[in-house]
């Protein structure tokens, strides 16, 4: 139960940091971190297929695409960053208040966080299929994601 609360708080903090940070690269890192925490939550909720897709697509592929786009942009000066930061805080000042109120409201409502979904008899578990029967597909997916990330770095490096 405590780990669920810690994961929920970490997810909210990572998402808030993603939105509030001024630097684009830090936002991408925050988005990947948020996606990784969400993946852990999905695994804990016994939804491994959704978790695998969340981790591979959102944390991996989308982050690589965003980093490649960021590498094509120009860096802002310190004055421009100060102006942008003031604009961002003026737009999103209400966000932490809403997050705290939502957290308090969710804390007051009893939510069962320790339920488990049952697999129907005769069906294979998705974790068993991915890790034991189709492990070469998983390795191939990891290699493709890494090749894409290294390709983006090699193409757009100064």
Image (cartoon, grey):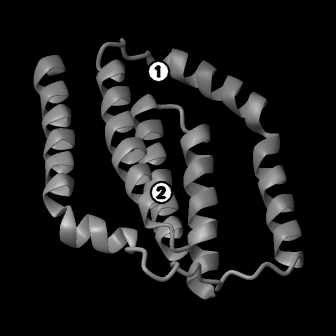
Residue 158 in view here: no
State which tag comes first along the sequence, 1 or 2. Answer: 2
- The answer to whether residue 48 is left or right of residue 7 is left
Foreground residue among 151 and 70: 151
Q: Secondary structure at mark 1?
A: helix
Q: Position of residue 144 (x, y in %)?
A: 16, 40
Q: Residue at x 88, y 67 (%)?
A: 105
Q: In this rendered view, identify the residue nearer to me: 25 or 11.
A: 11
Badges 1 and 2: C-beta atoms under 8 Å apart? no
- Which disc is residue 93 wearing? none
* Label 2, residues with CA under 10 Å away: few <14, some 14-19, many ≥20: few
CA–CA distance between discs 1 and 2?
41 Å
Residue 44 at x, y = what percent? 51, 76
Which residue appears at 57% of the width and 24% of the height?
A: 82
Tag 2 residue:
50
Mark 1 or 2: in front is: 2
Q: Is residue 87 left or right of residue 51?
A: right
Position of 116 relative to 123 (above/below) = below
- Neighbor class of circle 1 (other Cα within 10 Å; few <14, some 14-19, many 20+) is few
Q: Residue 4 appears in which quarter of the rendering?
A: bottom right
Position of residue 83 measured from the top left corner of the image (x, y, whole percent):
62, 19
Residue 130: percent from the left, percent from the top? 28, 64
Residue 65 visible from this viewpoint: yes
Point out which mark residue 78 bears. 1
Depth order, front residue of 55/129: 129
Which image quadrant for residue 57? top left
Helix, strand or loop for disc 2: helix
How many badges with numbers are in the image?
2
């Amino acid at each position: 139960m405590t780990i669920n609360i810690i994961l929920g708080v970490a997810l909210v903090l990572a998402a808030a940091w993603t939105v509030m940070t001024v630097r684009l690269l830090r936002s991408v890192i925050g988005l990947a971190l948020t996606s990784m925490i969400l993946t852990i939550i999905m695994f804990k909720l016994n939804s491994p297929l959704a978790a695998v897709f969340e981790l591979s697509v959102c944390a991996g592929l989308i982050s690589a695409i965003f980093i490649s786009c960021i590498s094509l942009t120009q860096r802002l000066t310190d004055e421009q960053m100060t102006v942008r930061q003031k604009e961002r805080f003026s737009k999103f000042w209400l966000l932490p208040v809403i997050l705290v109120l939502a957290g308090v409201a969710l804390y007051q409502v009893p939510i069962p966080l320790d339920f488990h979904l049952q697999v129907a008899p005769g069906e294979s578990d998705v974790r068993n299929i991915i890790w034991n029967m189709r492990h070469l597909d998983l390795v191939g997916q990891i290699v493709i994601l890494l090749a894409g990330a290294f390709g983006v770095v090699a193409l757009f490096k100064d």
